[in-house]
Amino acid sequence: MPYEEIIKKTIDYIEEHLHESLTMDDIAGQVGFSKFHFHRIFQAAVGMSITEYIRIRRLANASATLLYTNERIIDIAFYYHFESQEAFTRAFKKYYHLPPGQYRRLMSDMLKNKEEPYMEKQVKGWFLSGSDPFSYEMGTDHEVVHQGKASGYLKSKTVLDSTNFATMMQQFKAEKFIGKRIRLSCFLKTKDVEAFSSVWMRVDNAFGDVLQFDNMSNRPIEGDTNWNRYSIVLDVPTDSSIISFGIILSGQGHVWADQFTFEEVDKNVETTNIEMQSELLDEPMNLSFEEEIY
């Protein structure tokens, strides 16, 4: 996919330098583009300017600092490179619809009231599946967030080895996207992922046959990674019925997900579909067992 690795490299650089001064010249220089050309590339891929993206990420980190520390608001503002507490308050109120101090009080009280440590965590619209879902946990996290107030997470609990996996997923009717090529994008962050983690999407017909599928098996996410953007592009054939998608965690580890988006893309955008071998061959083959695999 054009520029995908460049965007990943850029976002990774931004994540590592959120507490420092970041300029367009510095960022564009990391990938060898002019700042004007790179601005267009980033805007087209991520849907916002680099300046806006940096501001949103700094505000998301600031919101978590407000909730989980006793740091003074003015210190948080300067740490995340706002020129004053007033500038920080204006920016924060624009995205969170509350000034920082009020956000800290209301959200802290809300989180305390919602603590239910002995109940199974539920996430609206999502369900847990896989080979061993009872060895994993899914939920929402207000401390590790890419944008807004919360992210979703999937983590191992009693997993022993990499033969087990779970997925935090959704399914919906394909009708809206019939005949289109669509891109699923999201932001993921991982910690201590032993085997692999990824985003995935599948398109099935009414009989349950898989028409299109990608689970990033050729580009898995391992170990510890910063927030970064990942995409899958699939066609939705005319006989499609259901679209399923989610995140996978194989073996031990912890993965966070945020900001899932679906969009129609032009046919010149390459699909990431993994070719699935048909269950039935057109005719019998290698009946004498003498044909080699090359």
Image (tube, rainbow, N blue to C red):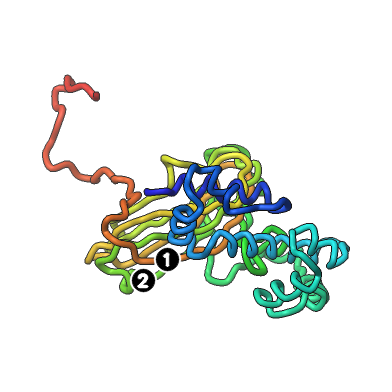
| In the displayed structure image, the side of residue 166 where residue 145 appears, left or right | right
The kind of secondary structure element at disc 1 is strand
| In the displayed structure image, the side of residue 210 where residue 225 appears, left or right | right
Q: Nearer the viewer, residue 165 or 13?
A: 13
Taking the view exactly as shown, the residue that stands out farthest to the left is 283
Q: Position of residue 159 (x, y in %)?
A: 62, 43
Quarter of the figure with the C terminus: top left
125 shown above or below 284: below
- Residue drawn 74% across the image and 66% down it: 63
Q: Nearer the viewer, mark 2 or mark 1?
A: 1
| In the displayed structure image, the side of residue 222 where residue 18 appears, left or right | right
Q: CA distance from mark 2 to mark 1?
A: 13 Å
Q: Residues within 10 Å of mark 1 (few under 14, many from 20)?
A: some
| Residue picked out by circle 2 | 173
Residue 135 in sight here: no
Q: Nearer the viewer, residue 276 or 269?
A: 269
Dividing the picture into quadrants, the one containing residue 250 is top right
Amino acid residing under circle 1: Phe
28 shown above or below 100: above
Query: Which numbered disc, 2 or 1, marks the residue that appears first in the sequence?
Result: 2
| In the displayed structure image, the side of residue 145 where residue 235 appears, left or right | left
The kind of secondary structure element at disc 2 is strand
- Residue drawn 79% across the image and 57% down it: 79
Q: Position of residue 198 (x, y in %)?
A: 50, 48
| Residue picked out by circle 1 | 262
Amino acid residing under circle 2: Lys
What numbered label is drawn on residue 15?
none
